[in-house]
Amino acid sequence: MEILDPRVRFDEDGTSATFDLDTPLTGLNVGLRLDRSWRSYFVVIDEWKQRLTADGAQVHVLYTGERVGDEGERTRSDLDEWSRLVDCAVVGLGN
Amino acid sequence: MLTTRTRDSCGSSECEIEPLTSERIDAADDLFGLYAQSMEQGFGDGLPVLPPTEARVRSLIAATPWLPDDVVCMLPPRNGAATVERVAVNAALAGCEPDAFPLVIAALEAITVPDFNLFALTTTTSSVFPMIVVNGPSRGRLGIDCGPGCMGGAAGRGSMTIGRAVALCLRNIGGQRVGETSRSVFGQPARATGLCFGELEEDSPWPSLAQRRGFPVDDEVVTVHGGKGTFPIADLNTDDPGELLALIAKTIAYPMGNKFLEPTAANGQIVVAINPVWAQRLASAFPDVTSAQEHMLEHGWQPIEAWPARNRAILEEKGRVDGQGRVHVNERPDQFELVVCGGHGGLHAVCLPSWGESDMQSVAAVRAGDVSVQVTPAR
């Protein structure tokens, strides 16, 4: 029998996209965004910040909070402001 | 949502010239073969499925005022377009009957309201999943279980298919896949079967959940809650209603609940399903449900000493500890949502713990012929 396909066909696979800067880090504004609930990443952030700074980058760390309600509004405002500061960023460090 | 049209139509979705654009699959003729095929090709959920034939899908669409290519929502995590047609295909897969299909649509509309935070729910390490509470006059007709076994075992068709249809949409349209886009450590049964039950409005001493959320009593309302599972509560000993409710509040404020991981207690609701016997007992002391919710707020906390020292420091740093050394699970009374349902055996309640960063949402279902529907043609 013929049935209809219930799936959306996605063009690319489900893994996170990765990017190459193709440029030295010197003078670049690099953002690191972390959900502050995920404290294990604090250690990671500290290490990356040191290394990025050593390579000449200007590092901007953003610790985000809740995503709904009044706190969510503040989080979105912080993200908006932070996104204007950076040339590139590492995000998704959290849950 | 549901205001777009991609082309002018001749009107009713029963119109046969409206093509269904889903790809076709040459499926096995027998249901065992179809089940195996659903597993091999990845459009199943591990449970047996029913064939979403064109006729079946059209019958579901015809129960709504929408056309097949109307977009209900974009479903995370991969932002697949949930057209009415695609939703109907998945609902047919789940065995949803046409009369229940408008509630599937309403549930998808509700879970994609931004403050429900669906992208986070579909990708998290947590077990959270959209849980559905139904209010209104169609519960019995649709087989939405409200009484004994309402959270599993009563086997009403609506209860067993509406939630599952939503789950299949998240898999097949949203692209939620464990180990890929979903990092859920354990999952939970509702991620396959869904959880959809009704409020036992007839036995409730209080206004229904839908009424409290602003809907007329005759509306068919779907309320969605990001629930982490079903957490059973039992008591044989407490006669006093105030003490019983206080004990319930203390129980649901368990230290390793998600609400205590958040920076604030302000977001999310905790749903407590109260059996009708307890509801009457509680109402004798709390005839107004808000007084019951206030009582729960008063008792819904743990002493900071319940946590180890390291955790205490984190809670204090987050400002979660009040002047009396208490950590409250919620910030406001209305975050304790009482829903009367279940059997008359008493003794039990069920908590649907909150994931935290997700606010409950409610949408009224819309049916074919509903004259109040306004549709904006696409530009």
Image (cartoon, rainbow, N blue to C red):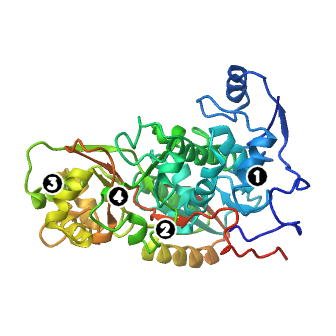
Distance from Cα at disc 4 to Cα at disc 1? 35 Å
Q: Which mark is residue B218?
A: 2
- Residue picked out by circle 3: B247
Chain of the residue that carries numbered disc 1 in the rendered image: B
Res A8 visible: no
Q: Earlier in the sequence, mark 4 or mark 1?
A: 1
At label 3, the amino acid type is: Leu
Q: Residue at x 44, y 69 (%)?
A: B217
Q: Are marks 4 and 3 on the same chain?
A: yes
- Residue picked out by circle 1: B85
Looking at the rendering, which quadrant does residue B302 occupy?
bottom left
Residue placed most toward the observer, B95 or B218 = B218
Is the residue marked by circle 3 packed among few (<14), some (14-19), or many (20+) residues within 10 Å? Answer: some
Q: Earlier in the sequence, mark 2 or mark 4?
A: 4
At label 4, the amino acid type is: Glu
- Identify the secondary structure beneath mark 1: helix
Q: Position of residue B286 (x, y in %)?
A: 18, 68
